[in-house]
Each structure stands twice: as C-alpha cells, then as structure tokens.
Amino acid sequence: MIIRSARSEDEPAIWAIMEPVIRAGETYTLDRNMSEKDALAYWCGADKNTYVAEADNVIVGTYYLRPNQAGGGRHVCNCGFMTSAEATGRGIARLMCEHALKQAHDQGYRAMQFNFVVSVNERAVRLWQSLGFEIVGRLPSAFEHPTEGYVDALVMFRQFQNS
Amino acid sequence: MIIRSARSEDEPAIWAIMEPVIRAGETYTLDRNMSEKDALAYWCGADKNTYVAEADNVIVGTYYLRPNQAGGGRHVCNCGFMTSAEATGRGIARLMCEHALKQAHDQGYRAMQFNFVVSVNERAVRLWQSLGFEIVGRLPSAFEHPTEGYVDALVMFRQFQNS
C-alpha cells in the first residue's frame, strides 16, 4: 500500500469513501445530507493537505492534515481519517495515522489533536490510544448518535517527542 | 446598555474592537496580521449570529453565536466575545455571555462550548466558571503566548438545564 498526496482526479474515489460515512452520521459531525461538492470542498479544501491510501491501484482510504487553529495555535495539527467500507479491518487507518504523524512532525507541528471522537466509536478510541493519543477532554452529550442518542465526545491529543 | 443583532453599518465599530485583540495575539487563535476584511468575514460570517453591546450609542462589545459542529453535533453552540479596550472591567463580557446563554437556550441549543480558552487568561476562565462553565478538557501547550511561551488551552462547557 502506498500513501500519497491526493490529486484532483482522485475526487470521485474520495467521495465514494466519504458518502457512506457521512450518510451514516455515526462518526463525523457533518450534515448527513451533505452534497458531494460540499464534502469534497471540506475534505480537499485549500486549508488542508489531503492524502489517499492506495492498494493495487484502488483508493482504500483518505485523510487530511491541517493546522487545528490559526495564530498562537497553529503548531498543533488536526486530521480526519476515512477508510472505504470494503477495506475496513485491514489496518489502513493505523497506517494512515502513522503516515500523518510523520508528515506532521516533518512539517514542524508539535502535536496532533482530534477535536471530536465519538465516545461510542470504541474501535477508533482504542486505535488512537494505541498510537499514543491521550483523552484530554470529554464533551458531555455533545454528539447525537443516530441510534444511541446523546453520547459524549472525546478530545484526544498527542504531543510529539523532540518538539 | 442594550445588546442587539449587529448590522452591516456596525462593522467599523466591530473592527475597532477586534483589531487590538487580534494584534495582541494573547487570547484568540487568529493570525495576528489578519486583515479587517478577513476578520469581519470571520466574526460576522453567514454561519454566525453576531451581536453588539451598545452603551450611550457607543458599541462597547461584540459576540457571535454559532453551532459548534454540524450534523450530530449541532445542538451544542459556540461563542466568541470581545470587549472594547476602553470599556473593560465594566462587566460587559458577563452581560454578553448571559445574553448569549439565553439566546442559545431560546434557539434550542442544549449546551455551549468554548473550544480554546487560553489558560493564562485567568480573568476569562474565572468569568466563565462563574457563569456555570466547567473545564472539560486541557490541551497541553496548545497555545503559543506572545510573552509567556507555550501554555495550555482549556475546553469549557456548560450544559443547559431543561435540555
């Protein structure tokens, strides 16, 4: 598998990954009816570096990396990760996050922050913890899950060594 | 003092409040060199309801109210508050926040979240705590303060009663 910067011709494949995630509404705080155009503008916007994971010439995952804040907060980055429904369970999110951590470190960031990890997304919480992220905040009932109702969201944070 | 929705003709007065706050870079994660145009687009953007506090026909403070997230997170709002340098210490931020809490409740929000309160801004931290906000997260060294270096930022949260 290779991970590389996204190109404009990757957008249909990126949208194919995004659409079921957005429509499910279980993990991202995005409008479940979001259009393809708006979703791609969000994920591939000028404020972000967007990457794709490719296996056998098929795009199986995508992530973005951006400064989480401007001004005095721009040394902390933020990422979003999505894996194609067909390719889950193959460790693609882990590989993408490892890639992102290296990119972020190389780009001079001092830490990575996830602003909103849905607490009942236990697989994601465990994955991020295994990659060195700590839960630094808990937002009570901040997410309305389509089947589980109001659940907490977590703020997760990893500081880089030698930063 | 009255608090009312901002109008386009208020923009010069809003900018007069924003400019020293942005240039100081001590409390907001905004680019210290941000232009007037970009600052007003941010503060008075279509995603926000923007208000001004007016005393004796002079605008002495401004705040915005917006959903903090989309999708399953849109029941939690976010605000930003700024008071004019000449009018600090008169309780204007407190009055604006009380106004915001009522607006938010009336608009159907269930909670208000501040994403990034600079920890050394003790006056703000105490004010929000006195208005019922709790510290629900601490972002280690997430803010580069112009004179104090890397300091923590706090996530503060208030759930509404009867929500």
Image (cartoon, coloured by chain):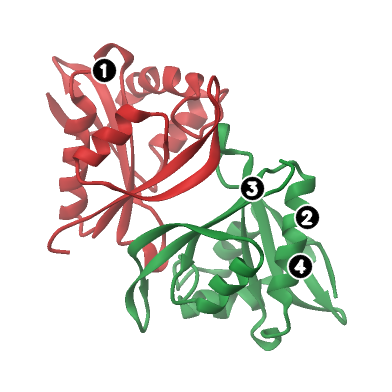
Chain colours: A green, B red
Q: Is residue B160 left or right of residue A58?
A: left
Q: Which residue is mark 4?
A: A52
The nearer-to-camera label among 2 and 1 is: 2
In the image, residue A151 above or below residue B4: below
**Which residue: 87% across, 82% down?**
A56
**Chain letter of the residue carrying label 2:** A
Toward the bottom, the furthest residue is A86
The nearer-to-camera label among 3 and 1 is: 3
Callout 2 and callout 4 share a chain: yes
State which tag comes first along the sequence, 4 or 3.
Answer: 4
Callout 4 and callout 1 share a chain: no
Q: Which residue is mark 3?
A: A111
Real-space Cα separation, disc 4 to disc 3, in angstroms? 22 Å
**Which residue: 38% across, 36% down?**
B44
Q: Is residue B119 left or right of residue B131?
A: right
Q: Which mark is residue A102?
A: 2
Residue B126: where, in percent of width, then height? 27, 34
Q: Which residue is mark 1?
A: B88
